[in-house]
Amino acid sequence: MPLANLPDAIGDIRRFRTVVTVLMEEGMAHFVDRMRLRYLVPLRSRALAALRLRPGARRTDGPEAGPPLEVRLRRSFERLGPTFVKLGQIMSMRPDVVGVDVAAEFAKLQDAVRPLMPGTAEKIVERELGQPIENIFSDFTEKPAAAASLAQVHRARLKDGTVVAVKVKRPAADRLVATDVRIMAFVARLLEEHIPESRRFRPVRLVAEFAAWTMRELDFSLEGANMDRIRESFRKDSEVVIPGVHWKLVTPSVLVTDYVGGIKVDDLTGLKKAHIDSAWVAAKGLGVGLRMFLRDGFFHADPHPGNIVCVPPKAVRKNAEPGPENAPRIALYDFGMVGTLSERSRYEVLSCFSCFLNKDIDGFARHMVDLAQSKDAADIEGFGDDVRSTLTGILYKPLEKKGAAFAFYHVLLAGSRRGILFPADLILLGKAFLTVEAMVLKLDPDFDLTAAIKPQVTAALLDEFSPDKMRQTAETSVFDALQFLKRLPEETRSLLERFEKGEVGVRIDLQELYDLKEEFDRQNDLRVLALLSAALAIGSAVIMRAEQKLAVLGLPVGEIGFMVSSAMMVWLFLLIRKGPKK
């Protein structure tokens, strides 16, 4: 071991001993013994654990006695501090992995931490930005507006008068997280090695996901990029506010953004005092969520009421002229944790919601299976039964206020029970959508979820077939098609050489040969049709963007060409769906 790493190694050992001791004291001696770690626990803690003499504890005789396991785990994480609290909070978002009971218990974990000592945040800002704090801010509030396990936020004012929020990372947060993640990974491996029943929770994979998410959350510059990306998505919507980022004042440990004050969306009394219709807030909040979930595929992964506020109108008076200044707005905060869906996954999710609205239960089940990350040895038939049971209970019980989010989330959980694994970001989407749906029903108990979702799903589907979207798809796909055509002769020659060398054995069946020839011909026709439609689409787009419109016999050439290319693409899609002759 290099000497430079020796202090870190000693720190890891001390911290590891603390972790094992806390687990022992919280009534998990049985698991500590099975992982063969009892030797790390001090004799005094072993004695106390044996007698269970900690305050509020009672004598127990085995792993099943005393409080439930999830309660003991939650108490252990609270004692072990910020990194374990953050792990517990993330585990609360993964009931598909840890189970509903454990997730519900970990949802009680809060960032109950003391603020930094006065003056500490200012010193961090000065160190990170390389200049005295008075050169940057005309005012910096010493008391934090919010304090969490890894960072705290201060309100300040720039020299030009702009009110900003300054997010400051806690000292040594990176080192603490790195140490705890190494320990978590080691314990996870021990769990899977010595406690076989823990393998269904996939502890190693869970810790790896946690490490990836937390390391991203520790980089405040990445959070600023997330904010800019989502603000770009809502740039045409004056009713949505994403705080602006002051990039000259951003480092991995300091993030300065515009300060946006407002009323928490679940503060019904505050909304009423500000003359803001809670039904409008419900509809707008749902629309913002669906925009991110269904159309962007890039979404706020923790949209609880603490991260969403309603900004009152600047002028609240009778007979006010309508406009952005005299209308309420929705503002979103805290973009450290975001989720991303691949284009394919987003299409499948959109198809699921479309099936839900059309009451196509079997179609919903098929698309959910297509979303699975792994379904080897899964009980697909049992999963289909779960989907039918869940959706029937929602679609045909009109008196119960449950919508598409409830259906989607509970079907995801059913998949884990049937051996179907879904991507982590998909679980985050389900949890986020369920949170938004619950918020909507709290704001307006009479809100019609299905009626509100339907136009959003329709708009997202139409957006996929808009001229701009099809043009973008054509521009991207045409180069892939050209590259394939360029590689085709070389790959064909390589295949023929392998035939000549006898590296490929062939059993000739004349009928199969004829069928193969027909399929080659069909594939070539499809390639030619794809290239022609893509070329026509790009050419038409160029003509449409030209300053001088080109027309023949008074007919716009660009628009007609684009319509023809669209028809060719639809024809191509139908031919692909039809497949080869059987």
Image: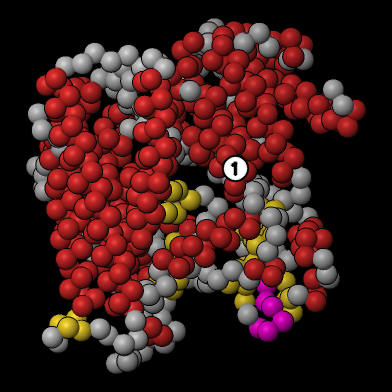
Residue 185 horizontal side relative to residue 342, left or right: right
Quadrant containing the N terminus is: top right
Residue receiving disc 1 = 214
Q: Nearer the viewer, residue 70 or 468?
A: 468
On the image, which quarter does residue 103 sit in? top left
Three-letter residue code for mark 1: Thr
Could you tell me residue 530's position as x and y percent?
Answer: 25, 53
Does residue 47 appear to the left or right of 524 in the view shown? right
Observer-nearest of 284 and 225: 225
Q: As rendered, which of 459 and 414 lies closer to the eye?
A: 459
Residue 439: % across, % down? 34, 55
Q: State the residue lying farthest toward the front.
A: 500
| Residue at 38% over, 27% down | 495
Q: Which of the 4 image quadrants contains residue 223?
A: bottom right
Task: Assess disc 1: are there few (<14), some (14-19) or many (≥20) residues with their C-alpha within 10 Å of its C-alpha.
Answer: many
Please tell me which residue is depicted at 21% across the width and 36% down the height of the picture.
520
Residue 101 spot, x, y in % from top left: 40, 29
Q: Is residue 210 magenta?
A: no
Region of the chain picked out in magenta, as a range: 156-161
Q: Residue at x 70, y 36 (%)?
A: 178
